[in-house]
Amino acid sequence: MFSSAGRFFLLALSQREVRLFLCSRHNASELEIEGVPVSMEVALKQDDPQKQLQFHTRSMAAGGERAAVFHGHGGGTEDSKNKILRYFQQIDQGLHRILREERAPLVLAGVDYLFPIYREANSYAHLLDGGIAGNPEEWMAGELHEQALQIVAPLFLKAQEDALAQYAQWKADGRTTKGLKAIVQGACEGRIETLFVAAGIQHWGFYDPETRSVHLHEDAGPGDEDLLDFAALHTFLNRGTVYVLKPEDMPDSGAVAAVLRY
């Protein structure tokens, strides 16, 4: 689930409902989004009445910034867009508190005319182009997840290919290792930039932080854990990137390999 090679967010938007999912290749889990308005009606009730008459925002245009100004006095297309934009800005503000430390891609699902309006309000740097067009209220989580996978799969494949190429490049400079003990210790100390782990393989043991030593065992014993999972988790917690590969796709034909930060 935490692997960078298959972790993304899915935001399902409509004027009556907002849902945020944390997704892996295999499933989509709906997240609690406290602080995010549940509908446009709720958002506009919470909005400052003065802001309903005049609203200023900034958006990007080719060659620089332009100011977009909407004056809403009821009934018109610009007024409708203004209301939706204010609604989306409240969503973005709420999501910022949830996603501010994240780097995983974000996929939008919604009626297609909403996409450019949400992009004006968006501040999350990893929002993907395009999205799932349609009314997400009509789709179950599994259906949304299946469509989102088609959008993110090429992105993840390209990132994985680039990471493997980087491993080959840095290997000649001594900035890679496939030693499990060195990788476990490096993961705990934040020295792993990119970690490759073979799926379906376990290496049992434990890490002693007091002595900074790694103890390996052939079979799982009391207090042992899978050190590949351990290394992956600590790499992720230290803002490294983790790729889970088929054993035959692993660099240097091992169970684990890493690119070091230093």
Image (tube, rainbow, N blue to C red):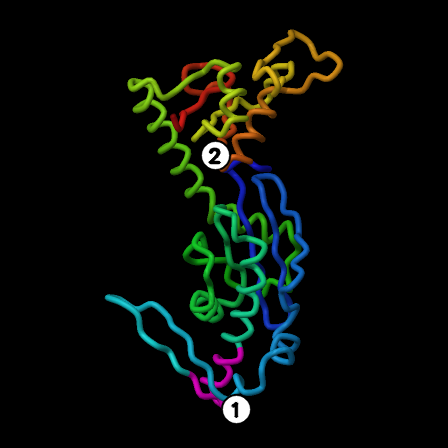
Residue 181, position in %: x, y? 53, 14
Answer whether residue 78 is magenta in the image: yes
Instruction: Identify the image quadrant of the C terminus.
Output: top left
Is the residue 123 above or below the residue 100 in the image? below
| Residue 75 - label | 1
Magenta range: 70-83
Residue with the most extreme left position: 63
Question: Residue at left 29%, top 18%?
Answer: 172
Residue with the most extreme top position: 218
Residue to which mark 2 is pinned: 240
Q: Amino acid at mark 2?
A: Gly
Cβ–Cβ under 8 Å for marks 1 and 2: no
| Secondary structure at numbered mark 1 | loop
Q: Nearer the viewer, residue 104 or 144?
A: 104
Q: Nearer the viewer, residue 199 or 184?
A: 184
Q: Amino acid at mark 1?
A: Gly
